[in-house]
Image (cartoon, helix red, strand yellow):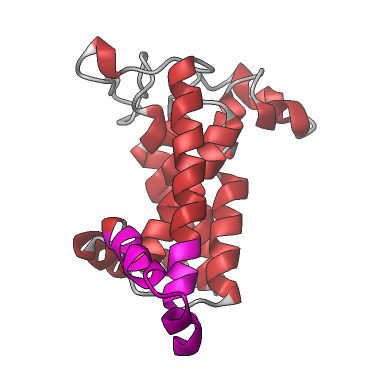
Amino acid sequence: MIHTTHAVFAVALTEVMLASEHAPITWQAVATAAVAYAVAPVPDIDQPESWISRHIPGASVVSMFVRHRTLTHSLLVSTLLYLVLFGLGLRIPDWLATGIWVGWVSHWVIDLVNPRGVQLFYPLPWWVKPPVPWLAIEVESTGETVIRVALTAFAVLFALAYLFLHAPLEIQHAAGGVLSDARRVVGWGTWPWFGAVCRFLHLQ
């Protein structure tokens, strides 16, 4: 996936996480999504031709030592990053730590649909990839474009619906039938089990 697909998926995932936790509309919630958006392309620092490697001076050096979709796309690095952000008592603001970790993890989650998969259990030589070829999506393919457009539409629509449900009652009542539509949209993207997992991990 290219950087914009990773970024918009991170935002969509963050929105679903916050809604599943019934989070209020605050600047911290918006900042969490913004941080996830910014961090999501970073794991591709192991690819010299990636957007992140081309826009950060010296970043391409990483690809000289790390194979693409291995270490930076692994549970090992995701776990170590979580421990740094949440387990060392560094007093990193929750919104910042959550945005960084969700952005990072979202990257390899969507890369699982890549035909070559990711070495999720690095350093073990096991690559996780789509179980059947027709589920695989090549980078910069028509399939990826469709996914990116769909994710963007979802993120915008879901955010507007969630904002509407937190608007003053006068505005909700004045909009009439829009209220039921907004509830339906938010209901589709609100998963209690996901919210419980995120709260357990202190993602908020």
Residue 185 on the magenta segment = yes
Residue appearing at x 46%, y 41% in the figure: 151
Residue appearing at x 51%, y 25% in the figure: 145
Q: Is residue 103 visible?
A: no
> Farthest residue toward the top?
133
Q: Is residue 177 visible?
A: yes
Q: Is residue 123 above or below residue 83?
A: above
- Closer to the camera, 166 or 85? 166
> Farthest residue toward the right?
57
Instruction: Estimate the x, y position of residue 100 in percent, counting from the top left.
Output: 53, 54
- Closer to the camera, 65 or 196? 196
Instruction: Estimate the x, y position of residue 194 in percent, counting from the top left.
Output: 25, 59
- Region rendered in magenta: 160-187
Q: Is residue 31 above or below residue 118?
A: below
Residue 191: quadrant of the picture: bottom left
Q: Is residue 168 above or below residue 150?
A: below
Left or right, 58 with reference to 69: right
Left or right, 194 with reference to 1: left
Instruction: Estimate the x, y position of residue 32 in percent, counting from the top left.
Output: 54, 63
Residue appearing at x 44%, y 80% in the figure: 172
Residue appearing at x 59%, y 21% in the figure: 47
Q: Is residue 6 above or below residue 83?
A: above
Residue 136 on the magenta segment = no
Q: Quadrant of the C terminus?
A: bottom left
Q: How many marks?
A: 0
Left or right, 23 with reference to 28: left
